[in-house]
Amino acid sequence: MRYLDMYVNNRFVKENVFLKTTPEAKALPTFEDAKELLPAPFWEGHDRAIACYWKAWQLAFKNLRKPTSDNGFISNYIDTAFNDCLFMWDSSFILIFARYGNRAFEFQKTLDNLYAKQHEDGFICREIREDDGGDQFHRFDLSSTGPNIMPLTEWEYYLNYNDKARLEKVFPVLVGYHLWLKAFRTWTDGSYWSTGWGCGMDNTPRLDKKYHESFSHGHMVWADTCIQQILSAKLLLQMSDVVGRRQEMQAFEEEVALLSDLVNHKLWDDDSAFYYDLWKSGELNQVKSIGAYWALLADIVPENQKEKFISHLRNENEFNRPHPIPTLSADHPDYQEDGGYWRGGVWAPTNYMVLKGLHIAGYDALAHQIASKHLDHVLMVYERTGTVWENYSPENVAPGNPALPDFVGWTGLTPIAVLFEYVFGLKPNVPHAILEWDVRLLDAHGISGYPYGNDGILDLRCEKRTSPNEKPIITAKSNIPVTLVVKWADGEETLKLG
């Protein structure tokens, strides 16, 4: 069908260089070709974890695709592995673990294909068809786009590779998309709405029963969407400092202040110490969803509320289930022990989000505890089934119901990024030439060929210890100057490498 052209042009989209980029024509590497270029972890006594790590990469390399003349993509990419579409939500999380394989394949360019499909008003569809390159949804479909976490993915890549040139290219694209959401996904008070599909958590029972749980906005203020926009705005402000465009970002500074105040006053319930969605009636929906924990990552939780809010993650009647963290609190009547997709299922991306938020909040011990327990369950299911799954049961050592197998896909987060960052404790900040190693394991462990920036390759080893208080014996080698900050229960030491 043909429609009248009602686009209102976005000035930032005019800077989108991806719209006119010539498609690349590079051969795709195989896993066998790439393996020697991937970081190689070791962990004494944990062969199962190492086997699952390599299985995740093997599955990832099977999902590499090339652009075609029919779809108009511009870069080789990693497929979402869900249907025949490239997903915004999934790709953003996939690239968080895939960045560790950048020496073997430029995974980050996967997002270039989404950027190349940006509309002139800033819109980017959340699913792009891989056969013809078309949007899966009309831009004004209630479920057409989101969640807006591409700035998080690009910032994480920048912290690992210090690629200012890429930031300069993606910055106007991300600003344009953020402004589209602000124009078309807000209520009169500046709060945001979405849908079950649009927020990525399809069937979470958040809406008033008279609305469709997956396809309606329910005239509701959506807590996770509001908080993701705060996070997006904050990250775009940081990017603007790097690329020298802060003077254009006053509206983003104002939105951070407005939304942070709104979330903490309208969506916070002091009695239960939790953030909820706000129904049209003015009532909080009292549904404890994992989506509330974007607040830790966006760093908007007031200090005097932080401990109570985080305590829900320790509560065995809520989020501290045998396999943490269910996406719906276990005390909700619609919670399902087999996961029920987003009615209690344990998902790698939302777990990763919570772990990162806990780190930002200063709760590294809890992050390590949850990460270890989550990884252990994923590994037990891997041992039983030989693969990794789309999501997992919160109560049993089993995949979720329903769940797709061989899901790399974003489940590669757990055996790769969660292992490196929250079990081993390695967190890079390449722009400041720092690598933090928060040592909590007692077993000997480490990584050879750890990528650090475009040129850095590090070999890292921690010897076995007898207690958390024992100073780690570290052997580290780098081909470039790096400051390695080693932390453990009783101390901290700075080592100069390179």
Image (cartoon, rainbow, N blue to C red):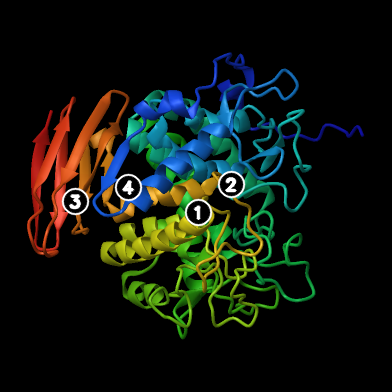
Front disc: 4 or 2: 4
Question: Where the N terminus falls, by quadrant?
Answer: top right
Front disc: 3 or 1: 3
The Cα–Cα distance between marks 3 and 4, rounded to whole angstroms, is: 14 Å
Task: Assign a secondary structure to mark 4.
Answer: helix
Q: What residue type is labelled 1?
A: Pro
Front disc: 2 or 3: 3
Residue located beneath label 1 in the image: 349
Query: Which of the two labelled residues, at mark 2 and mark 3, occupies the earlier sequence position?
Result: 2
Compared with 424, 218 (above or below) is: below
* Residue lying at the far bottom of the rendered structure: 271
Q: What residue type is labelled 3?
A: Ala
Residue located beneath label 2 in the image: 89
Per the rendering, the mark at residue 420 is: 4
Task: Assign a secondary structure to mark 1.
Answer: helix
Q: Can residue 249 be seen in this view?
A: no
The Cα–Cα distance between marks 4 and 1, rounded to whole angstroms, is: 15 Å
Compared with 241, 103 (above or below) is: above
Q: Can residue 68 be seen in this view?
A: yes
Residue located beneath label 3 in the image: 444
Nearest the camera: 341 or 429?
A: 341
Compared with 129, 214 (above or below) is: below
